[in-house]
Amino acid sequence: MAKLIDVSDLNIYYGDFLAVESVTMTIEPRAVTALIGPSGCGKSTFLRSLNRMHEVIPGARVEGKVVMDGQDLYDKDVDPVSVRQHIGMVFQRPNPFPTMSIYDNVAAGVRLNAKRMSKSDLDDLVESSLRGANLWTEVKDRLGKPGLGLSGGQQQRLCIARAIAIRPSVLLMDEPCSALDPISTLAIEDLIGELKSEYTIVIVTHNMQQAARVSDRTGFFNLAGVGRPGHLVEIDDTSTIFSNPSQKSTEDYISGRFG
Amino acid sequence: MTTTTGPSPSPEAVAEIEQPMRQARLPRWTPWASLAAALVVALLVTAPGGRSLGGVVAITAIAHLVLIGVLSAVREGSRRAKDRIVTALVTIAFGLAMIPLVSVVWTVVGNGLARFDTTFFTWSMRGVVGEGGGALHAIWGTIIVTLIAALISVPVGLLAAVYLVEYGAGSRLAKAITFLVDVMTGIPSIVAGLFVAALFVIVVGPGTKLGIMGSLALAVLMIPTVVRSTEEMLKLVPNDLREAAYALGVPKWRTITKVVLRTSVSGIATGITLAIARVAGETAPLLVTLGITTGTNFNPFDGRMATLPVYAYYQYTQPGVPAEAGVERAWTAALVLIILVMALNLVARLISRLFAPKVGR
Ligand SMILES: Nc1ncnc2c1ncn2[C@@H]1O[C@H](COP(=O)(O)OP(=O)(O)OP(=O)(O)O)[C@@H](O)[C@H]1O
Ligand SMILES: [Mg+2]
């Protein structure tokens, strides 16, 4: 299921403002790729351009190629809606649907798309997704209760369950732990470790230790200056990036000398 | 009551730096006592002969302000005194705002109860000249006309609001629509009536009066309020939710119907119910579009129709013989109308309670 993504010469704009400049990278399948870099360098922007969520913002557009499975996602006749069904996303702030129960939140991908599915199949899907997100044991007795009644960490895992319930090939996560306590963070990091056997995972994080712990490869984004576009400085195996990066700025950033 | 740790300064220095946390306070019942005292003062000052309700209330209010201010300033210091005076001012303003409301309800209930009987709800005015008679035809008319107005304006208003928030945001067309909606909110209701009347004069012929014309006039008045209130509700839906749905590969129109509208349905329904309540009592546009009848007419496309506000108007201006009977019917019609509007407001609250997203375990 997991897929490789090839990004080449990607320029990402908000209107006339070039936010991220010429990114070229390969995202390996069945691996966790972490994106790090100072605030405002365009990590979220880049991540959102991978599943065409970027263009949801009025005026936002992209130049370049994002190729998955030999198919350019930005091809004219590619439907962004189906791209998003293949590439799921988890946001920084947990955002369960407030009107839906825990069960309905997980089933949202199926229900909102009006896909036909028998009750028992849907039950199985909900259970396996919640198990996949390590949330099943905590919520199995109150599936009918509102999703907003969960703690922040549980809500975030609910959102992960919701994202994997559409059975994507790739899972994008934008600072999924930044609003969580250390224990929930650990639970989600463990989860990421388990999920990577099935999914290609890209995670944005500000937490260096987290990047080192969970990722196989790490990409470092940086800003040349205020008002200048962000760019990818380098991407390599996580161990290489953290032990002997090829760029000086990467080393400075990782050792906390700037940022 | 110091909580400072570390090297402690001398007690005198502490007293100098720190404000004392405990202060003398007036007892809880002081404002009430002051109010009572103010009332006594007002009664003493005004001569028993020339006493008027307004005068007593005004003097009581002023005396209360002075009294509570002075009391508080002496005992509690100037900051508390200001707080007391402002609290009293706000309460007095609230009381002033309540006067017309209470007085209207009081008068209407007082005058309307006389004919609030079964005859009123089971009879029309067919063949009735003097005593007796009812408003069954007008009640039906109001229900039918308002319902059709709602059926016309809810879809139009809802879809317009969805366009403005979800599709048009920032575009020129959206700005133009917003401007026009704002203008429409301000048009006098008689203009809406005359507009529809004039339209039907051109299309059907002079002197046409139909139930549907009244509905259209009310719809013209209702659409802008529906658009505005729905727009506000849609704007309240956090963008996170739209993005969450998009990220699941849900198309935009499904996101709007199943997530955005579903999340805001309680506010939208409340807004619509209030808009209905608002137009249900309109008189002027109905006067020029559907006139009045004495009998029940269920067909909005055929002939005149009676409605409660217009009924009240005619019962008051052309009461027949004896005049008291008509005037009493007018009051009762007003009472029924107020009850109807209140019921709609209660329904609105119920709806917002019912559909509101539930948080909790
Ligand atoms: N909706 C938007 N409209 C216009 N410009 C935006 C928008 N969102 C982000 N930007 C700009 O794009 C650039 C990159 O922002 P982005 O959010 O991708 O940074 P980031 O690396 O994710 O930062 P952080 O670590 O703080 O989340 C910034 O200069 C930002 O101001
Ligand atoms: Mg970000």
Image: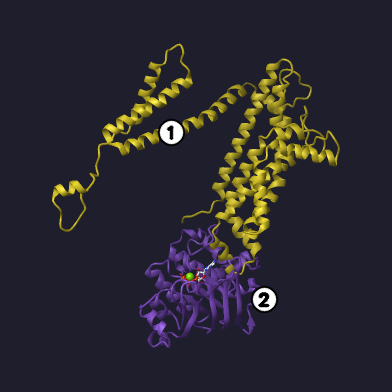
Chain colours: A purple, B yellow
Q: Quadrant of residue B219?
A: top right
Q: Quadrant of the C terminus of chain A?
A: bottom left
Any part of residue B175 in sight: yes
Residue A250 vertical position relative to residue B189 in the rendered view, above or below: below
Residue A249: which numbered mark, if any?
none
Indicate which label's residue lies in the foreground, 2 or 1. Answer: 1
Three-letter code, disc 2: Val
Q: How many marks?
A: 2
Q: Which residue, given by chain and number where applicable, does mark 2 sit on? A: A78
Residue B129: horizontal and vertical position, in percent?
Answer: 76, 19
Q: Are marks 2 and 1 in contact (CB under 8 Å)?
A: no
Residue to which mark 1 is pinned: B91
Which corner quadrant holds the N terminus of chain A?
bottom right
The answer, for residue A167, to whether it is visible in the render is no
Residue A184 image offset from top left, x and y in percent:
41, 69
Q: Name the side, left or right, on which B242 lies relative to B55.
A: right
Q: Which residue occupies the extreme right position in the image?
A: B205
Chain assignment, label 1:
B
Element under label 1? helix
Where is residue B147? Give x, y as percent: 70, 41
Residue beneath the point at 42% across and 33% down: B89
Q: Looking at the picture, does residue B216 appear above or below residue B5?
A: above
